[in-house]
Image: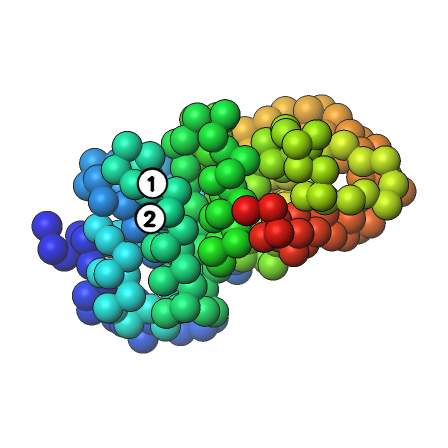
Amino acid sequence: MADTCTLGPDLKIARHSKQASELEVGSLKIGLVDFHCLSRECLANAIEKHDSSIELFQFPSIHHLISEDCSGLDLVIYHPHSRDSSDEVIACDVSTTHRALPDLPIVVLSDVEEADQPKTIRSTLNSGARGFIPTRTTGIPIVVAAIRFVKAGGTFAPIDQLLANQTAHTSIISYTEPQVPLTARQMAVLSHLRQGKANKIIAYELNMSESTVKVHIRNIMRRMGATNRTQAAYKAQQLWNSVESNGASNL
């Protein structure tokens, strides 16, 4: 069991046994931290089955992750469980990981209820995470798209939840023009647009019809006040940056 829970020599061997020319374009090596062995293994298998260019290395705790040589990893997924960890514990774990591995983006999977998400999202992002994915409403295709969006430099979070109590927290974010928050599925499409993928490829990778992808793209452009795909991606990134920079003052 220890071999499946820690990085061990496997990642080092993988790094040195493959020539750069043999690696798939866009391949990712991800550290997956989850105390529950069953959910950890199921999640790793599901992600790797959906996208064969992603390889996950499993860890039972933040301590095990930090104690290993993580120089070959591209990103960290942390999957705490709300029944086992409070917001404060999760924020502490994220902060500890960010300090120890400052160059690795951290994505948090959370099973907290929607009513508790705004506070949890803020504390998670302010602790150093670059992504917050609600497991109650998000499937594997969106998880994979969110991972790649974060790796590309974005910040992924259900912004509709962040702004759900905007009346009580009016200073969370200030718009310079009328905008409507994007849904998780729209953000998944947007992350693929950033990579220059065609509608047919986006449809295949997100398990949608091509016509649905076209509808999402039109809605993204309309909601972001954009005239083309590049402008939509830029405006979305500005929105995430604004949430990150202003969220700390509302904790």
Label 2 sits on a secondary structure element that is: helix
Spot occupied by residue 117 in the image (x, y as percentages of width and height): 50, 33
The residue under the point 82% across, 49% down is: 231
User: Is residue 201 left or right of 225 when viewed as pictured?
Assistant: left
Residue 198's disc number: none
Question: In this figure, which residue is indicated by the disc labeled 2?
Answer: 89
CB-based contact (under 8 Å), mark 2 and mark 1: yes
In front here: 6 or 239?
239
The residue under the point 41% across, 37% down is: 110
The residue under the point 66% across, 37% down is: 169
Spot occupied by residue 227 in the image (x, y as percentages of width and height): 89, 42
Question: In this figure, which residue is indicated by the disc labeled 1?
Answer: 86
**Looking at the image, can residue 123 be seen?**
yes
**Looking at the image, can residue 22 be seen?**
no
User: Is residue 125 left or right of 51 when viewed as pictured?
Assistant: right
**How would you rate the neighbour count of disc 1 (Cα within 10 Å): few for under 14, some for 14-19, many for 20 or more?**
some
Q: What residue type is labelled 1?
A: Ser
